[in-house]
Image: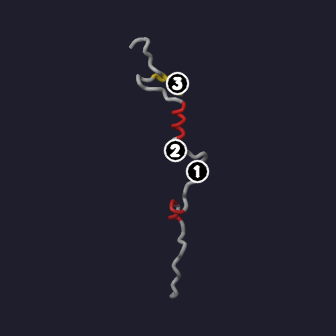
Amino acid sequence: MSDTQKFASEQIDIGEQMLIHGVQPITLAERLMMLANAPMQPRSKQRPADDGLFDTNAINQLEMFHPLPSRDG
């Protein structure tokens, strides 16, 4: 490889990264598009969905309806 042919490079968080022939550096627009298309993340800690269908503590609950006591005794 002659001195006139140089590898392209891009600046990343840990320093400069050299790119192989044919690879283009990632542009700011491409980075922003990747962030915009990423799944949304919660801004604060979410409460667990432990009610209704997703209630994992339902086995610890008492029965809502109890059988009637027998009249014999």
The vertical placement of 23 against 34, above or below, is: above
Q: Amino acid at mark 3?
A: Gln
In contact (CB < 8 Å): disc 3 and disc 2? no
The vertical placement of 62 against 46, above or below, is: below
Of the image marks 1 and 2, the number of the one nearer the N terminus: 2
What separation in Å lies between label 1 and label 2 (alpha carbons)? 16 Å
What separation in Å lies between label 1 and label 3 (alpha carbons)? 36 Å
Q: Amino acid at mark 1?
A: Gln
Of the image marks 3 and 2, the number of the one nearer the N terminus: 3
Q: Which residue is mark 2?
A: 39
In contact (CB < 8 Å): disc 1 and disc 2? no
Q: Residue at x 43, y 15 (%)?
A: 5
Q: Residue at x 58, y 53 (%)?
A: 47
Q: Amino acid at mark 2?
A: Pro
Secondary structure beneath label 2:
loop
Q: Which residue is mark 1?
A: 46
The vertical placement of 37 against 9, above or below, is: below
What separation in Å lies between label 3 and label 2 (alpha carbons)? 26 Å
Q: Single out the mark in the foreground, 1 or 3.
A: 3
> How far across and down, in percent of the image, does residue 13 sit?
53, 28
